[in-house]
Amino acid sequence: MGSTLRAVRALVLLLGFYLIGFVMLGALGAFDWWIIAGGHGGAGAKLLFLTVIVAVPILQGMFAVRGPRFEPPADGLRVDERQEPRLWAAVRDLAEQTGTRAPGEIYLVPHVNAAVYEKSRLLGLLPGRRVLLIGAPLLTGLDEAQLIGVLAHEFGHYSNADTRLGAINRRGFEQISRTVGTLLGRSAAKVSAERAKAEEKQAKRLAKGKSAREVNTGYAGASYRIAARPFVWYGMFYVRVMRGTMRRQEYAADLAAVRIAGRTATASALREIPVLDAAFGFYFDSYATLGAGAGLLPPQGEVYGGLRHLLAARSAELDELRRQLPEEEPSPYDTHPPIADRVARIEQLPDDGRVHAASGPALALLGDPAAAFAALEQASLTPEALGMRRTADWPQLVHESMAAYADRSAEPLRQAVRDVSGGDGSLDATLTAIESGALWQIAERLPKSQEAQAATGRAAREFARPRLRGMLSDLTATELIARGAAHFELSWTDSAVLRLPDAHAEDLLRALDAAVADVPDTSGLRRLLTPPDRVPDAVIDTAQGTI
């Protein structure tokens, strides 16, 4: 389907929204006329007022003056040609090969994504300034040939007029969403107000000693929900109609990428994206934000730039993910075809004779990657995050963060010891309390799951033992760190580990087991707390729920 026909269809679908709106307003007007002509008195006046209230959000959705506009990404960093000449040169060269205009703006964004937009006019019928978004993780995880394949796909949307005509589609989506959102929002407000009234009445009944009744909001907000339903149905129809076109646009853009970057480079880039997405999500949660709870951030430029360490260390694990494309559940409303389907289509194309060989990291397109990533942090992180203390390096971040978490996790145990024995909650006071026979009294005061709260006797002890041991482990780690006898060690392939003096690792695990046994024995922990004379080099894995 040519761009003209696609534009006509998009306009027809948009007009369909207005047709439904006029039909709804006409029905409300007819209802009002029936009320007025019938002379229904006070009840009729209330119904007239209700129809006016329902008509307002429909009118707002239909005749909102401001159409959809491209807004610069709030978490993006705009890069100009003076800052990144090589990146801009590559983008312009790619636009020339694709046979389309180059973008006028490029933004780096902290997402595993690349996208193109066009600030078109007259609902997309007139072209406008173009914008390219490039995800920083793509620059880190793809080689240059793969990135060219990804960007060539995006430029394929330019050459097919997808970005320009996207304004019409966005207008339809936004008009429907605005109307439905307003109607359902008012319905929710009505339900909330009715619930508050019902709960107030319930409280008065209970205060008088009467039995409780089920809180029921009745038909509150029903008129808004009924008015929203035709627009919801039309929205679902809208997406289903556009789905086929949007999927064909993706396949056409893939062919443009194959023509420019080659079949194998484009297919490998598509295989890499879900791997990068999973790796970046894991990295960001487990490393980049590890110290957030302790008020710590990685060094400048490493919040996003540190991903390279994880990718290098876990290459074998990631290779396995590359071989297994994600299985996506098909949805009639998903406008993007599954990646596995796109890869299969590309790999079934005739061999173009171009072999994808490592062409150097795409990061080399940036003049100073560390400076670019540092600037991206300033543009994307919240003021609260930017106010956190930066560590000198990753080992310091991991050690200080894990030490802070261990100290915080041990606090319930400290408080329980204070409550039971009156001690100061230190490790020494805890061991003294255990030696005095207060172990299970202390365990009783620790936080419990619902299942543990219901348990009694032996079962209650077995529920309490792992939690008690874990907190004692954290308290011991805190004490050893304070004495300089242990430290947490960074690992890019596994969880952080606590390094202890030589041969003490297994001793500590046994000592913790003994301290929370049915007949507690703290002598092992007492011996291990003697200040070590040797350099730490034994390791305990923190992933086991122990030190």
Image (tube, grey):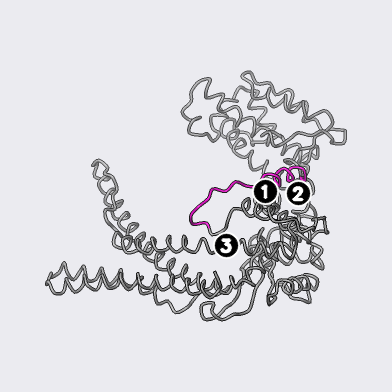
Ranked by sequence position, the earlier of labels 3 and 2 is 3
Ranked by sequence position, the earlier of labels 2 and 1 is 1
Residue 413, quarter of picture: top right
Q: Quadrant of the C terminus?
A: top right
Whether residue 399 sits left or right of residue 293 in the image: it is right
Residue 382, quarter of picture: bottom right
Residue 547 sits above or below residue 283 on the image: above
Say which amino acid is labelled 1: Phe
Q: Is residue 317 magenta?
A: yes
Give the residue pinned by disc 2.
310
Give the residue pinned by disc 1.
282
Q: Which residues make up the magenta segment?
A: 314-334
Q: Bin the neighbour count of mark 1 within 10 Å (Cα to Cα): few under 14, some 14-19, many 20 and up.
A: some
Say which amino acid is labelled 2: Leu
Q: Secondary structure at mark 1?
A: helix
Give 431 or 17, whichever is nearer the viewer.
Answer: 17
Q: Bin the neighbour count of mark 3 within 10 Å (Cα to Cα): few under 14, some 14-19, many 20 and up.
A: some
Residue 385 sits above or below residue 429 on the image: below
Res. 449 mark? none
Give the residue pinned by disc 3.
248
Give 365 or 356, whichever is nearer the viewer.
Answer: 356
Disc 2 vs disc 1: Cβ atoms closer than 8 Å?
Answer: yes
Measured Cα–Cα span from mark 3 to mark 2: 36 Å
Q: Secondary structure at mark 2?
A: helix
Measured Cα–Cα span from mark 1 to mark 3: 32 Å
Residue 319, quarter of picture: top right
Whether residue 205 sits left or right of residue 66 in the image: it is left
Residue furthest out toward the right: 534
